[in-house]
Amino acid sequence: MSRRLKGTAAGLALALAACQQPAPDLSERSETPVSAPDTLDFRPAAWADMTGWSEADLGAALAAFDRSCARFTQRDPDAPLGARAGWAGTVADWQPACAAAADAMAGRTTPREAFESAFTPVRAQAVDPESRERADTGLLTGYYEPHVEVRGTRQGAFTQPLRRRPDDLVTVDLGRFDDSLAGRRIVGEVRDGQLVHYKDRTAIEMENAGEVFAWGRPIDVFFLQIQGSGRLVWPDGRQERAAFAAHNGLPYRSIGRELIERGELAAHAASKAGIEAWLIEHGPEATAELFAVNPRYVFFQTRSLDDPQLGPAGSSGVALTPMASIAVDPAHHAHGVPVWLSADLPELGPWSGLVVAQDSGGAITGPLRGDFFWGWGEAAERRAGSTRAEAGWVVLLPHTVVARLFAQQDPV
């Protein structure tokens, strides 16, 4: 068992549970999809049919999953793993898998043995709620943790502020008022006793909403807001994290797409480097005007960089692992679920690997929509900026969850 469970009755119970749960027999259901509400179908999959599985290095994904398990132990066992993804089962359903992962982390089994003993793979398909047409793949993009040079005062090229969350910004958890809205939130501010939309980007800058704690180059700060977090680099070499604190609740609009639509940039040139070159050429006034096209504004909080080998905390509260964490849409998926992804990735070509759903993002919407965390540094930035692929998903689910899903339908 892991150190946090060693010698405890709870740890022993979890280990026994992991050994006692057999994989469900789905041999008669190969042609029968099981539908999660509205948007996802699941079909049986086999380990042997997952290209690259037997040779893959699963160590990073195992560590990522183990970190998610640490969060599970803080939750009610009867709670759904995902507030809007009931198909993923309860926290209790995942405890045997966490025990298997803890054994592998302690070196008593291999990562592959842990995953194969605790999970049944199922292939996911996106379903159009109206036409019921199915898609085998979904869009996969990439993101990274940028390094952003900053100053303590506005000076030279460092003219764009980084702001903390304003006191008047209100986030409402709608699930507190209606169980059917669990996991959904709205953002605004209170005016005359009513909750209304929060200020847009232009108004935030004009009204100086939120304490300014650092200054960066405009393009760097803007892309930091898109990524949602980053590492701040001060003149003395000191680094700290700018962690996501909140956004203003307004929709995101791509400035790259805006420049393409205006005819200012070709589609292949609308990268960070291409946009930055355009901004330098056109000057501060054009920069402010272009940024205003995107009304969404992200506020940050500073955090110490305790472990430089781990990424920032995702929206699940777990530190992200390079090439082993993805952002998903929580309307369709639960955080903590392992996914075997297959996609054509920049500089890697056809790639398959195990990742864990540990984050979400405003632009990540849809049943098979993913955002691949590349890590940090120049290679991660380069790859993230050019990641746009169709990815296939095989979801790893505990045996009890799969048995329950497929029990909903009779075999053919």
Image: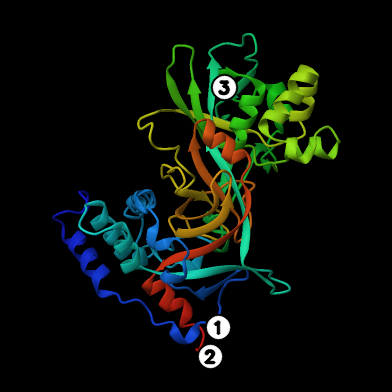
Give me the residue at 40% from left, 56% from top.
Answer: 56
Q: Which amino acid does label 1 sit on?
A: Glu
Disc 3 marks which residue? 211
Horizontal side of residue 111 vs 390, given as left or right: left
The vertical placement of 184 against 266, above or below, is below
Name the quadrant containing residue 72. Answer: bottom left
Q: What residue type is labelled 3?
A: Glu
**Visible in this render: residue 158?**
yes
Give me the residue at 73% from left, 74% from top.
Answer: 131
Closer to the eye: label 3 or 2: 2
Specify which label sits upstream in the sequence, 3 or 1.
1
Q: Residue 257 at x, y = what percent? A: 77, 40
Disc 1 marks which residue? 31
CA gap between label 3 and label 1 equals 57 Å
Disc 2 marks which residue? 412
Element type where label 1 sits in the image: loop
Q: What residue type is labelled 2?
A: Val
- The foreground one among 318 and 84 is 318
